[in-house]
């Protein structure tokens, strides 16, 4: 986590670790049952996505840093224990056990920023059963959130074809935690900056912003508003659509004449109407006024489809502010992320519930490459002879992060760019890849699964 | 906010007030421009939803309590100010102004739990321009989140026709803040309980839960798992689909024979497969075993459509666990919520941006009722002669909550049930209401709007 704070003070509350009570009640009732029944052997839980949404060729794994921070710090405070005692379901012995709770296990995970596919473990936690079980709710919550949003953002960045995309989502992303984590996930996916100041503070991300209609309205005249804003922020972006977009652009041109060499406005921002037509006409007006260096920045309910369409039709737009549709992953706001027991006490475990298969034991994902280009993945057993480049690595051992567990958001952004560049072109495209990226199960894992199924069914 | 804490300790971090840095950068750059240019007159901003999603006949207003808590407590800490100074955009005078920042304005709002419709103000903030402007990001974020989720939950509760709905969303709701606030919003919408322990602690909501497949798997045999769990939790719900649902039910029957009068299991839970068929066969088996009092609880990717369909086809299901699809409002994960300047320095203001109209001045919503049944709403000016029951009320004056600003989640739940019962039947139904609920703009407001448009365009 990059925190280039002026004087490295404590993180704001919004970035504080989650309460241990952020869990489903059944995790705690199961924990008590494990503890009371002596079910304390090591278990492995595997976190993976069962199916990719229709409009996703790949997912970008994200959220590991928050998972590790949680596992390092999760504690039951006196307040939490008093609340649990008040529920009448938990005995003193178990509450004492919770008081001493520390996570002591291992985590194997793909680096943040790694493209992953259906059924591939994003992370596996191996720890005494109760420790690994307790983590479920928070771990799934954070990996789900951040992977959902990073996977959407990759598409938006792809559509923008090198033009900067700015995260404008804070006001409609679901809650403050999501908005903060989103800004980081978007950064990993290649988004250029965020409007979210807290995300800038917590993660050291570039923050940016323009102006709102309210500023223009409050100032009385649009030209007065532009003058006042430019006096304070000479290289700002001016919002031109409060009353009439093209009249707004002509006022920017007037301001340029007025200020002469002092005019340093970077761009105009279009936020409503027909962005193709308006961007063309604004470009023509700006160029005619000798303002070729003033860019055009667009926002207004944008997503990857709208951006792709605008650029396909030649819209002269230099950057995009993208809010809600990226911020809630509007077309696929959830993923079928699960966290499933796959080994206990040295034996592979799985459930047979209809249509919800699990791969038993600790696993590895091997990415097969030819000429530097990925051609497919193999999901295998953790101890198998590698068929390709293994993606999961130990990021926490015995409750402590390894070096691999301390990768930063910058590392993850680099990882994403690099790994994405190695995938087949159609998999990186917006349209559904045909055929989809190939993922198969290794022969040893298949044999082991059949073996475990026979045992469980027997 | 109901907090029946054992010993009233401080709230956990996850429920702490948001950082003042949870804002879009442009709010702060505009604030500096307001301060530097003496734009300090009172302003009114109006928060409303521009359009209802296709599958929503109504929205349930939610999130006000968090808005008021934020306005009461928002402060710029030394850390925040140091970070802002490091950005190089803010001068010492403005940073000093931020250091002293307090919200001193008024808030008028509909009570939480009130059904609202397109263009109706959910709240209006009247305060010195900069104070009202700063609030935008957080206020929109919270009202958007909580109204989106409460509005979805109302549909799920409607579909369940009096059967309890339990919130299972914590693991896939977007982040910890949203999961916490969701549990409260769902409670307001009529959901019976949540699995989220932190929400129980913070809001005093009923918490509940069953067991996971991992427990059954870890125990080796399903019957052993049931025995171990029932020993600790005699009135629990047993998950029966880990290996084979109907064999699981038969093991519950076996356990009942084994335990005799000590058998107090409340229900079995089905979590996969064909819930209609499985619930029928489970019901038959339980009844044949003399276990008519053992209910059937269902989960597995449920939403209002799935529940409605199951009950239409006579599925003998007594309660529903609903997770992801309610928790992210899968079919409508965002609302077109905006927060727009509508008055400044005593004059109505609006912008004319294409297709995004604003109603000027402070407003009121009047609900017209006949025989105790709502027949339509009128959006009017705040000082108009009431045409019906006014919905907005002062909840904060001069920066302090009024009595109306201290309503609890319980009050909101009661309000929702009462207000919903007064709406026309088709508006409460799942299918699109034809005609939709009628909302019109009063003659005085229409005249005022035309007047302001003439002035702004002139």
Image (tube, coloured by chain):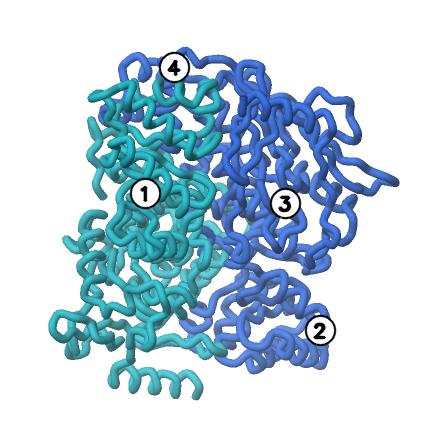
Chain colours: A blue, B cyan
Mark 3 vs mark 4, CA separation in Å = 37 Å
> Mark 1 to mark 4: distance in Å?
27 Å
Corner quadrant of residue A433: bottom right
**Number of numbered labels in the structure image:** 4
Q: Is A209 left or right of A214, judged from the image as shown?
A: right
| Mark 4 vs mark 2, CA separation in Å | 63 Å
Q: Which mark is residue A313?
A: 2
| Badge nearest the viewer, 4 or 2 | 4
Of labels 4 and 2, earlier in sequence is 4
> Which of the 4 quarters of the picture holds residue B127?
bottom left
Is residue B21 at least partly visible in the picture? no
Q: Residue at x 30, y 64 (%)?
A: B429
Q: Nearer the viewer, mark 2 or mark 3?
A: 3
Return the residue found at the far right. Answer: A371
Which SS class for mark 1? Answer: strand
Which residue is label 1 attached to?
B166
Report the side of B62 relative to B76 (left or right).
left
Q: Are marks 3 and 4 in contact (CB under 8 Å)?
A: no
Rendered location of residue B100, percent (x, y):
34, 48
Depth check, front residue: A309 or A369: A369
Q: Name the residue tied to disc 4.
A: A35
Q: Are marks 1 and 4 in contact (CB under 8 Å)?
A: no
SS at circle 4: helix
């Amino acid at each position: 986590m990059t925190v280039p704070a002026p004087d490295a003070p404590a993180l704001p509350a919004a970035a504080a670790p989650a309460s241990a009570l952020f869990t489903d009640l059944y995790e705690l009732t199961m924990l008590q049952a494990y503890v009371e029944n002596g079910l304390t052997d090591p278990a492995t839980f595997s976190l993976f996505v069962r199916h990719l949404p229709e409009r996703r060729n790949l997912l970008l794994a994200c959220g590991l840093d928050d998972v590790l921070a949680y596992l390092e710090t999760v504690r039951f405070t006196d307040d939490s224990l008093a609340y649990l005692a008040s529920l009448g379901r938990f005995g003193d012995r178990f509450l004492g056990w919770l008081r001493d709770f520390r996570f002591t296990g291992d985590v194997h995970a793909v680096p943040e920023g790694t493209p992953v596919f259906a059924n591939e473990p994003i992370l596996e936690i191996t720890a005494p059963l109760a420790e690994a079980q307790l983590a479920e709710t928070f771990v799934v919550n954070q990996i789900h959130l951040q992977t959902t949003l990073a996977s959407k953002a990759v598409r938006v960045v792809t559509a923008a074809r090198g033009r900067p995309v700015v995260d404008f989502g804070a006001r409609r992303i679901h809650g403050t935690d999501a908005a903060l984590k989103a800004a980081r996930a978007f950064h990993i996916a290649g988004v250029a900056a965020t409007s979210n100041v807290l995300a800038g503070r917590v993660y050291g991300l570039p923050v940016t912003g323009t102006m709102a209609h309210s500023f223009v309205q409050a100032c009385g005249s649009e030209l007065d508003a532009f003058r006042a804003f430019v006096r304070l922020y000479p290289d700002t972006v001016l919002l031109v659509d409060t009353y009439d977009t093209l009249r707004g652009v002509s006022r920017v041109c007037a301001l340029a004449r007025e200020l002469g060499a002092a005019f340093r406005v970077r761009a105009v921002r279009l936020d409503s109407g027909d962005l193709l037509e308006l961007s063309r006409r604004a470009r023509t007006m700006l160029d005619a006024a000798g303002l070729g260096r003033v860019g055009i920045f667009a926002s207004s309910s944008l997503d990857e489809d709208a951006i792709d369409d605008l650029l396909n039709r030649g819209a002269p737009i230099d950057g995009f502010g993208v809010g809600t549709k990226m911020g809630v992953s509007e077309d696929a706001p959830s993923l079928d992320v699960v966290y499933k027991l796959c080994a206990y006490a040295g034996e592979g475990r799985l459930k047979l519930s209809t249509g919800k298969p699990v791969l038993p034991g600790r696993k590895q994902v091997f990415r097969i490459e030819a000429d530097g280009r990925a051609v497919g993945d193999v999901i295998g057993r953790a101890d198998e002879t590698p068929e390709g480049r293994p993606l999961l690595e130990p990021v926490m051992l015995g409750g402590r992060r390894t070096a691999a567990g301390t990768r930063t958001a910058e590392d993850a952004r680099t990882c994403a760019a690099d790994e994405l560049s190695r995938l087949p072109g159609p998999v990186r495209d917006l349209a559904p890849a045909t055929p989809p990226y190939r993922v198969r199960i290794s022969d040893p894992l298949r044999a082991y699964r059949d073996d475990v199924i026979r045992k469980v069914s027997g």
